Amino acid sequence: MTTGKTTYNRRSFLKASLLSGGGLMLSVSWLSSVKAADKMEALNLPEQWAQLNGYIHITPDNVIKLICPNPEFGQNVMTALPMMVAEELDADWKNVVVDMGPHDNTKLGPQFTGGSNSIRMYWKPLREAGAAARQMLREAAAQSWSVPVEEVITKAGVLSHSSGKSAKYGEMASKAATLTVPKGMKLKASKDFSIVRKSQKNVEGKKIVTGKPLFGLDYRADGMLIAMIQHPPAFGMKLKSFDASQTLKMSGITDVFNLKLYEDNFEQGGFDTRTFNDLLVVVGKSTWEVMNARKKLLAQWEPAGDTKDTMSGRGGKREVTVPGGLESTSAQLEKMQEQAKKPAQQLRKDGDPETAFKNAAQIIERTYNAPFLAHNCMEPMNFFAHVTDEKALLVGPLQAPGWVEPTLSKLLNLPADKIEMQMTRMGGGFGRRAYGHYLSEAALISKKAKAPIKLIYTREDDMTYGIYRPMYTATYRAALDANKNLIGFHVKGGGIPEHAIHANRFPAGAVENYLAEGWEIPSNITIGAFRAPRSNFNAAAEQSFLDEVAEAMGKDPIEFRLELLKRARENPVGKNNEYDPDRYAGVLTLVRDKSGWNKADVATPGKETYHRGVAAYFCHNSYAAHVVDMVTRDGQPYVERVFSAIDCGIVVNPDAAKNMVQGAVVDGIGNAFYGALTHKNGAPEQSNFHNYRIIRHNEAPKQIDVHFVENDIDPTGLGEPPFPPVFGAVANALYKTTGKRQYNQPFKPELDKRI
Amino acid sequence: MLWVLRDHLDLPGTKYGCGIAQCGACKVHLNGVAVPSCQLPISAVGKQAITTIEGLSVNGDHPVQKAWLEHDVAQCGYCQAGQIMTAVALLKENPKPSDADIDSAMSGNICRCGTYLRIREAIKSVAKK
Ligand code: FES
Ligand code: FES
C-alpha cells in the first residue's frame, strides 16, 4: 500500500491512500489526545485502516464501501452517517455498501453514540470527506482526459465531460489516491441533496430479518469460555466469603474466583460508574452450564458500610463518599419529602420571586415524583474479552469506546495501542451502554482466567445490577395575580442522588419573576444517563404543571405556552436561556394544526371521544411536541393515537427518523404508565419482565403521525428529544380522561387504585 | 433449547431476552407453532421439527421478512427475529388477522425500541397480499 498525501484541519483530518489492489481509500479521523504522529504510523498498514472512525473505500471494480464511525444501537446511524458521505461524494446509493469499522481502536477518537449527537457531530466532517474524495476523482479524470477539472461533472458514481468521455469512480480511484486531498471544499446547498433527505432503508435490515450474528451476545471465538458474575443481593452489601465447592463439581465449570474491579484509590472517570466492586465470578464452557452452576454458589454477604470513590475527570480529582445502608423506596420517598422542606441550592433567579409570591392572588403548588428506571436494553449487557500480558481484544456492545479505553489501559496495565476494540451492533442502548464497567469486568476476568471469555449478564443481572435513571421529585409553584396573570414561577427539584432541574430552559426567560433550586441526597444505588437524562422527568413534571396553570388561568394549554414563548422571544427575561422561542413555538403550532387541536375533544362518528393531552419540550438542541389521544378501552385508559411535531433541523433519513420518533412515543407511554424500579432493603424489587412491566404490542398506539418542521438548519439531535414530552402529554390526557391529575410516576398503580 | 441453538449449533439468530417466557425474543417454530425456546427442554422436542429464523427462508425472502424490510421495521433489531417467527406462525394460522388477533398473537413479544406500529403494518401488508 502506498500512502498518499495528508492534510489536517482543526477538527479532523482526511487521508488518501492507494489500496494494494489499486483504488482509493479516504479516511476521516477525529483527533483525540493521541499525538498525530502516532496516528500516521497506524494509518500506514491496511489492517489498521480499520481503526479509523470513518472512511471511503473505492475499489477499481467500483465498489464503494463506507464505514460507519459510530456504534449502532437502533438509531440507524449506520445508514444515516454514510448517507451524508455519499451525498457529497455523489455516489450511487444503490451501489454503496456499509460496514461498522472493524477492529476499531479507540485511540482514534471518541466514536460516541449518545447525547443525540451522532448526526450533529459528523454532519460537517463526513460531508467534507465525501466532497474531498469527489474532487480528487474529478481531478484524476481531468488529468486523464486533459480537460479542465471544472468541466468534469459527477452524477451517481460516474464522472463525465461534455466531450462524451465518462468513467465510473472505480476507474479513476487509483489515480485519485495519488493526489493531494483538497481542503475547504464547498458543500452542497440542501436544495441539491439527492440522497440526504430521501428515505433510505436500514443498511443492516436484511441481516436483521435473517438472524445474522450482529450482536455482542452472538459473538464467538475459538476456545471462548463463558463467565457470569454473582453480585450481592442488595445495594449496600458486599461479599464476605464464599464456598464454591458445589459449583466446581458441576459439569463444564472451569473456574470460580473473586476479584476487585477497581483497586482502592483507583481514579474513576465520569463514565467508570460501576455497581459492585467485589466480583464473584463463575467461568465455564457454556452459558447454560455456567448459569446453573452459579446457582450452587454459597456466598455470604455483609454490609459494605460507607465507601470512598476517587473520582477524576470533570470537576477535578476528588473523594466521594458513598453512603452505606440498605435503602428502601418508601424510606427514600420520606427522605425526599423532608429534604424538600430544607433550603436548597439556588440555580437561577430572575426578578423578585419572593415578592411576586407574597403578592399573589392565587398560588398553585404541585409536587411530582418519579422512581428509578432500569434501561432494560433488549440485549442484556455482555462483552467478549481476550486479555494476555501483551495485548487485549474486546468485542461487544458499547456506546462510548473512547471513554472506557483509558480505564482499561490502567486496569490492564497495557498501553492504549495494545487494546483493540470491536463494536458490535447493540440490542438497545438508551444510555446504559455509555458505562463500560461490564467491559472492564470482562477484561479482568479474561486476564485472571487466562482465556478468551464472554461475560454475560442474565436479564436478572442486567436489571438488578444497573446504572439506573435517578429517583426524582420536584415542586412547582406558580403565582397568579388577581387578573390571573402569571407573575411568578418557582421550581425546586431534588433527587436521589441528583436532581433533574435544567434551570435555563423554558419557562425560564418567559416569566418576570423566576426561581429554580435544586438539592440532592446521596445514595449507594448507582445511576447514570437514561434516554434524555433529567429532561425525561422535567418534561413530565413541568408540562403537567403548565397544563394545570393554563387551566387555572382559563387558557388553552397550547395558547398559554405560545404566549409565554412570545414573551421569551420579544422581551426575554434573564440571561442564558437555552432554547429558541421560535422553534419551540414552531412545533407547538405544527402539532396544533396537524392534530386538529382546535376541534377540542375530537369525536369520531361511531367511536368514543378522544381525550387529548399536549406537551412540548426542548432538549439536545431539538424541539418536540405531542398531542396524545386517549380513549377508555376495557375500562382502562389507552393511548390510541398520537400526533408528533419535531424540529431537529434537516432530517437526514426521514422514514428512519419517523421510526425513531414513533419508538420514543411508545417508550414514553410505556415508562409513564409502568416504568419503575423500586428497592426494599437495598434489593431491587423487580428482576425480570414478569415484574418489571414493559409496554407491549396491544398497549401501543395504533397510529403515530410524525411531522417534521421543514427548515435548512444543520441537523440537531433526534434520539432523545421526542421522548421526554410524551410523559407530560400522557399525564394531561389522563386528566381529561379520568378527571384526576397525575403526580406520581408510574401512573398505572394509581389508576388501578382508583378503579 | 435456546442455549443449545445458540452455543452448540451456532444458530445465534434466536435471541435471549429474559429466559422466563416473558419477551418472545427466543421464539422458534415447533411444528409450525411459535414457542419460546427458553422454555423448551431438549427432551421434549424428540423428533418434532424445529425452525429458527435462520431456517425461515434460504435467501431471506419469506413474505414476512420482505414485509419487514419494506416497512423498515427494525430499530436495534434484537427482538425482530422473535417478532418475525411469531408473525409467521400467526399468518399461517390466520391469514387475515384482525387488529385484535394481531394484539393477542404479538403481545408476548417485547420490543424495547417500540417498533410495534410498524410490526402491525408489516403483518397487515402480508395479510393483504
Ligand atoms: S428469552 Fe425466551 S421468552 Fe424471553
Ligand atoms: S427493535 Fe430493538 S427491541 Fe425491538
Image (cartoon, grey):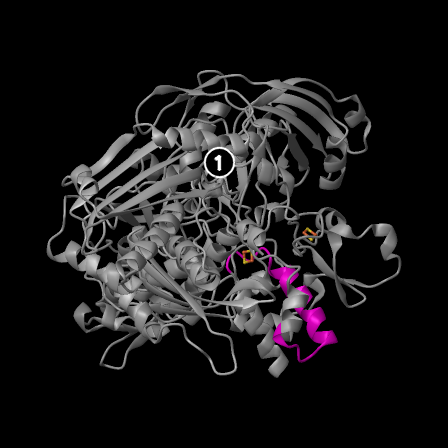
Q: Nearer the viewer, residue A743 or B3?
A: A743
The answer to whether A553 appears left or right of A404 in the picture is left
Q: Given the current orientation, which residue lies at the most extreme left position?
A: A571
Q: What amino acid is labelled 1 in the image?
A: Gly
Residue beneath disc 1: A436
Q: Is residue A115 above or below residue B104?
A: above
The quadrant of the rendering that contains the C terminus of chain B is bottom right
Q: Is residue B77 magenta?
A: yes
Residue drawn 59% across the image and 22% down it: A237
Residue A256 x/y as whole percent: 70, 24
- The answer to whether any part of residue A412 appears in the image is yes
Q: Is residue A294 above or below residue A718?
A: above
Crowding near the residue tagged with mark 1, few <14, some 14–19, many ≥20 C-alpha atoms within 10 Å: many
Q: Nearer the viewer, residue A553 or A18?
A: A553
Chain for disc number 1 = A
The answer to whether A135 appears left or right of B35 in the picture is left
Residue A58 x/y as whole percent: 39, 61
> How many numbered circles are shown?
1
Which residues lie in the magenta part?
B75-99
Residue A356 x/y as whole percent: 17, 42
Q: Nearer the viewer, residue A613 or A402?
A: A613
- The answer to whether any part of residue A33 appears in the image is no
